[in-house]
């Protein structure tokens, strides 16, 4: 079994276990801005990055490991068990062949996502500038995963489920900064502006 470090963002790491019951190395970061530092402090080649507010189902990690692709993201659910669209992010729908291949594996290629439950190679985290919560606030995870997924195409794995945290609150200044990045498409930009603009 490949060694895995569980990286908890936003609170002290909770002990976790690999499939088979072996304990996971645990690392914590106070915010997404310290993600690369946390990755550097881990020794395992794979990182399972979890928001402190996320509660994974028992087989969530196993489903990510079986996905055959990294990065691999879990499906965030609300308290009723419904998917939380704002936490999922956006699909990479520009490559039809890749989209169909992923669909056959019951996966969806991602263009960006919020960092709720993400299995990723430690080396991929270390090679990127970390997320910038000061600049992008609740959108920092989406901006960072857009850069990550541009280098390392990844997927949403619906078989891996987590009870997600609340979606980030809209912030006008951060949304305007996000508009100057390539993260959002036109439709996403318009939807977010409707959330943040009064009236």
Image (cartoon, grey):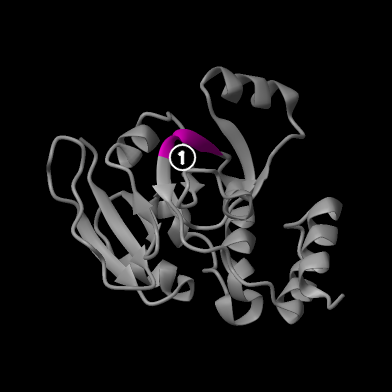
Q: Is residue 94 magenta?
A: no
In-front residue for pair 195/95: 195
Q: Residue at x 64, y 79 (%)?
A: 135
Q: Residue at x 57, y 63 (%)?
A: 167
Q: Is residue 7 above or below residue 105?
A: below
Q: Residues within 10 Å of mark 1 (few under 14, many from 20)?
A: many
Question: Residue 186: percent from the left, percent from the top?
Answer: 86, 54
- What residue is disc 1 on? 70
In-front residue for pair 188/34: 188
- Magenta extent: 155-160
- Residue that protrudes farthest toward the top in the picture: 104
- Residue that protrudes farthest toward the front in the picture: 80
Q: Secondary structure at mark 1?
A: loop
Q: Quadrant of residue 179?
A: bottom right
Q: Residue at x 35, y 54 (%)?
A: 55
Question: Residue 50: percent from the left, percent from the top?
Answer: 38, 58
């Amino acid at each position: 079994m490949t060694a895995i470090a569980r990286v908890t963002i936003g609170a002290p790491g909770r002990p976790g276990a690999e499939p088979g019951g072996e304990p996971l190395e645990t690392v914590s970061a106070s915010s997404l801005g310290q993600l690369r530092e946390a990755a550097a402090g881990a020794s395992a080649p794979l990182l399972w990055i979890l928001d402190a507010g996320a509660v994974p189902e028992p087989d969530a990690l196993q489903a990510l490991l079986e996905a055959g692709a990294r990065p691999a993201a879990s499906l965030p659910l609300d308290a009723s068990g419904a998917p939380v669209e704002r936490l999922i992010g956006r699909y990479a729908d520009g490559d039809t062949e890749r989209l169909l291949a992923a669909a056959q594996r019951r996966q969806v290629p991602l263009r960006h996502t919020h960092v709720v439950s993400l299995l990723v190679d430690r080396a991929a985290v270390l090679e990127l500038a970390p997320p910038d919560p000061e600049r992008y606030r609740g959108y920092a995870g989406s901006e960072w995963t857009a850069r990550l997924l541009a280098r390392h195409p990844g997927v949403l794995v619906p078989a891996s489920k987590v009870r997600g945290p609340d979606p980030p609150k809209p912030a006008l200044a951060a949304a305007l900064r996000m508009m100057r990045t390539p993260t959002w498409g036109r439709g996403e930009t318009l939807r977010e502006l409707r959330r943040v603009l009064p009236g």
